[in-house]
Image: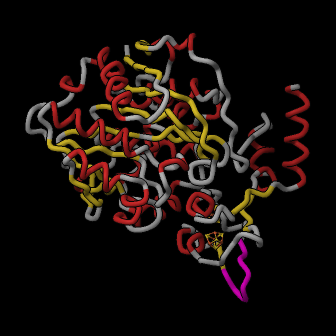
């Protein structure tokens, strides 16, 4: 059985977080069960972009700080590292409070710069992972629970994509991003190449709507932990009220025969899940929905069934960040206007994820609007 522990916690006040983390980890053996004295332990928070902690884009710095303190008390040497999707590591660390968290806890901040090339274990021939990540004795994965335009939800497994160095992320979106299934396989293979020792999810203030960069903070008041990130994500999905059939990572994990995808294989501990109020996160507006159409028809109508990115003229400042990040170079800026070549666009939504002004919208064509209305009416 894969153990997943849940603990309710009201806010990010550090004394309360410390108590909550002890309670959370106690059924898993406590922090000392994961750390040997002298271990170099890399904490891997979500450092997507330079956003203040209250925006719920990044893992809260107080959670990172208290986890770092617990690791040090268990004899570990603490590193905090990631490869932000946008902006310099130093600026992101400053803005999302991790500079101070590292200073306060005696941890070292490590930017993922160079990589090691690893032989793939399944679909992909080779995958480069950050050296600081791969060579750490232990990884403690600290994801933020958020909705995600492409993968519906980002949590423990998706957070490990940060082990791919920034500049290579776009290349992977291009190679694997045209299919949610293929991209899910990539994420799972990244996880299998270097398994985290422990995953602790920041679901105190989570994100719903147009995550992972432009959604709305939502209070969930929970920490979730476990050794197996697939199992942790299954429970995170339940606690976010996201239907399991909308989670490609879980579907692909089941196809790959990975343990932890079935509820009956997961032993829950800590706060009883039945006592936690149910909630359904608002889903991203650009999410790819198939409406149960036969696969051939869905394939033929693929472009009409997908929302497409369009810059909002009122808020777009033509900074070019989305254009520079677009894996298939589908965005151009000419004569003070931004345009997207929809035939080239692979709907990876990196543009929306990285736009600092929330200016990239997910537009729906007529057929998609009609089908969405019909699906809504059917449900009602
Ligand atoms: S959509 Fe956003 S990232 Fe792209 S040019 Fe406009 S403001 Fe910049
Ligand atoms: S336009 Fe946006 S969604 Fe389309 S491929 Fe480029 S970054 Fe991805």
Q: Indicate which quadrant contains ligand 1.
A: bottom right
The answer to whether residue 38 is above or below residue 92 is above
At 38% from the left edge and 32% from the top edge, which residue is drawn? Answer: 200
Q: Nearer the viewer, residue 273 or 378?
A: 273
Q: Is residue 322 shown above or below 16?
A: below
Residue 257 visible, this angle: no
In the displayed structure image, the side of residue 254 where residue 360 appears, left or right: right
**Left or right of residue 266, residue 299 in this image:** right
Quarter-wise, where is residue 223 in the image?
Answer: top left
Name the residue at the left extreme.
38
Residue 294: image location, x then y, percent: 78, 37
Q: Is residue 66 visible?
A: yes
Vertical position of residue 151 compared to residue 19: above or below: below
Give 152 or 105, whichever is nearer the viewer.
105
Q: How is the image coloured?
A: secondary structure
Q: The C terminus lies in which quarter of the figure?
A: top right
Q: Quick one: 309 or 101, which is closer to the camera?
A: 101
Q: Residue at x 56, y 11 (%)?
A: 275
- 102 within the magenta span: no
The one nearer the camera, 127 or 368, is 368
Residue 111 image position (x, y, % from top left): 29, 60
222 left or right of 102 in image: right
Task: Return the x and y of residue 33 as percentages of the image width and height.
Answer: 20, 23
Dominant SS type (magenta): strand
The residue drawn where x is 77% and y is 56% is 303
Q: Is residue 263 above or below residue 316?
A: above
| Residue 310, percent from left and from top | 74, 65
Q: Quadrant of the N terminus?
A: top left
Q: Residue at x 52, y 28 (%)?
A: 221
Q: How many marks?
A: 0
The magenta span reads: 333-340
Residue 334 as seen in the image, left or right of residue 113: right
């Amino acid at each position: 059985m894969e153990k997943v522990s849940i603990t309710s916690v009201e806010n990010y006040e550090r004394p309360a977080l410390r108590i909550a983390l002890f309670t959370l980890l106690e059924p898993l053996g406590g922090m000392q069960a994961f750390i040997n004295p002298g271990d170099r332990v890399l904490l891997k928070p979500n450092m997507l972009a330079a956003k203040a902690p209250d925006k719920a884009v990044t893992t809260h710095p107080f959670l990172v700080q208290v986890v770092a303190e617990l690791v040090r008390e268990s004899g570990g040497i603490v590193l905090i590292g990631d490869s932000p999707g946008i902006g310099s590591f130093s600026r992101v660390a400053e803005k999302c409070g991790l500079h101070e968290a590292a200073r306060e806890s005696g941890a070292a901040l490590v930017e993922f710069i160079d990589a090691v090339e690893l032989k793939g274990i399944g679909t992909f021939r080779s995958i480069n992972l950050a050296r600081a990540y791969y060579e750490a004795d232990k990884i403690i994965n600290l994801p933020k629970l958020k909705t995600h335009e492409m993968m519906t939800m980002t949590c423990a497994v998706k957070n490990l994509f940060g082990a791919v160095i920034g500049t290579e992320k776009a290349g992977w979106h291009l190679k694997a991003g045209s299919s949610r299934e293929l991209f899910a396989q990539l994420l799972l293979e990244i996880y299998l190449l270097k398994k985290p020792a422990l995953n602790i999810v920041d679901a105190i203030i989570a994100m719903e709507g147009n995550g992972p960069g432009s959604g709305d903070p939502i209070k969930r008041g929970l920490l979730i932990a476990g050794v197996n990130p697939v199992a942790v994500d299954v429970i995170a999905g339940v606690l976010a009220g996201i239907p399991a059939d909308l989670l490609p990572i879980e579907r692909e994990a089941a196809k790959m025969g990975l343990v932890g995808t079935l509820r009956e294989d997961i032993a829950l501990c800590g706060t009883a899940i039945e006592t936690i109020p149910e909630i359904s996160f608002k889903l991203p507006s650009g999410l790819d929905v198939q409406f149960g159409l036969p696969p051939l028809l869905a394939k033929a109508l693929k472009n009409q069934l997908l929302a497409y990115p369009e810059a909002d003229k009122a808020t777009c400042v033509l900074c070019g960040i989305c254009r520079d990040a677009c894996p298939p170079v589908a965005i151009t800026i000419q004569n003070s206007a931004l345009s997207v070549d929809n035939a080239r666009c692979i709907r990876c939504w990196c543009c929306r994820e990285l736009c600092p002004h929330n200016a990239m919208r997910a537009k729906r064509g007529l057929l998609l609007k009609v089908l969405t209305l019909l699906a809504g009416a059917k449900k009602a």
